[in-house]
Image (tube, rainbow, N blue to C red):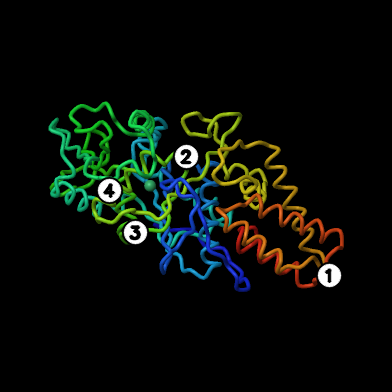
Amino acid sequence: MKSWPPPEVPPLPPGGRTLALFDSARDGVHPTAPEDPARMYVCGITPYDAAHLGHAATMITFDLINRLWRDAGHRVDYVQNVTDIDDPLLERAARDHEDWVVLAMRETALFREDMAALRILPPTHYVGAVESIPAIVATVARLLGDGVAYRLDDGTGDVYFDVSAAPRFGYESHLTRTRMVELSAERGGDPDRAGKRDPLDPLLWRGVRDGEPSWPGADLGPGRPGWHIECAVIALELLGDRIDVQGGGNDLVFPHHEMSAAHAEVLTGHWPFAGHYVHAGMIGLAGEKMSKSKGNLVFASRLRADGVDPMALRLALLADHYRTDRQWTDDLLKAGQERLARWRAALGAPAGPDGAALLAAVRERLADDLDSPGALRSVDAWAEAALSGEGTDPGAPALVADTLDALLGIGG
Ligand code: ZN
């Protein structure tokens, strides 16, 4: 699948730091220790509605990781998927009397435009579920052959994964079984489905139904893939048995990332699948989580069409720590716009305080679990001083401009 065009990343003087990140599995902040290349998998959109600010905040979070690793001298292999076949997409297409393929293509194109406008570094591989079906079919067949998956005997052809095959199941999310069952029901699982060995067992392959698209499944029979196996297969195919970061919004902690990790670990025998499971907070509006089902979405594309500078949007979303569930407000956007204007004015000053010191401060803050609020405060202080004529370093504005662009993605 086509990705989006990369923004320029200006080179910075050496001095990039080791990035430490919060890992959900270990429930604490730990240094990342990527091999060469660093490997990151981020769960992408299901393209049935345009990208809202929750998606934008999540993608900006993983963009910072990408930028920090590169600054520390790592090559980065970054994979993101598009779940371009799944129930929500078909339901939306049916509701709007639209072809699901057209809907998916249109929304994916809009997402790419938003990502380019926000200066998000594109993934190395941008991969759709549909194009991955042959690999998923082979993998599900292997799980069946290994006895860790089973076919329901109700004639549907549906295949499930046996979670009891994953000995460490639950290590990533640390939830009680009761809570797992609740979240499974809320987030696309089917704990009440008759005939499953365990209510938590996730779907691997859905046999063809009347009126639904399907693909050849060889011995599985025609059908389409489950969501968790989609991500596990794409990650294993393109990044190998172990990855450094598995990322997404915090609504993916369970079941999605727990299940994907269980699939990958049973397939490879390696544990843990990801060195860090990294989750971005949800963006709410008027006290509620922004979600398609609630219909309270603010779209990046809408704000762009209204003339909002994407860099101000980016700054608004960086103003709070990535792990915080937070509210989108007009004041937050206004503060981002004012900050952007102040920074740009300061970058136009003939001189400023020591640019190398500011670069070091931004690196230090971001390396500490992406403390973007701390990094922004450092830049604010530098900008105020530059605008007050306090600095005498004529090279500072150019170095600070490169710092903001390379590390925070604030360019243009
Ligand atoms: Zn995923």
**172 shown above or below 402:** above
Q: Is residue 275 visible?
A: yes
Mark 4: which secondary structure?
helix
Q: Are marks 4 and 1 in contact (CB under 8 Å)?
A: no
* Dot placed on the residue nearer the N-terminal end, 3 or 4: 3
* Dot placed on the residue nearer the N-terminal end, 2 or 3: 2
Whole-Å distance between the Cαs marked 3 and 4?
12 Å
Residue beneath disc 3: 242
Residue at the right extreme of this rendering? 389
The residue located at (77%, 55%) in the rendering is: 381
Residue beneath disc 4: 263
Amino acid carrying label 2: it is Asp
Q: Nearer the viewer, residue 235 or 264?
A: 264
Callout in the foreground (2, 3): 3
Q: Is mark 4 within 8 Å of ligand 1?
A: no
Q: Are marks 2 and 4 in contact (CB under 8 Å)?
A: no
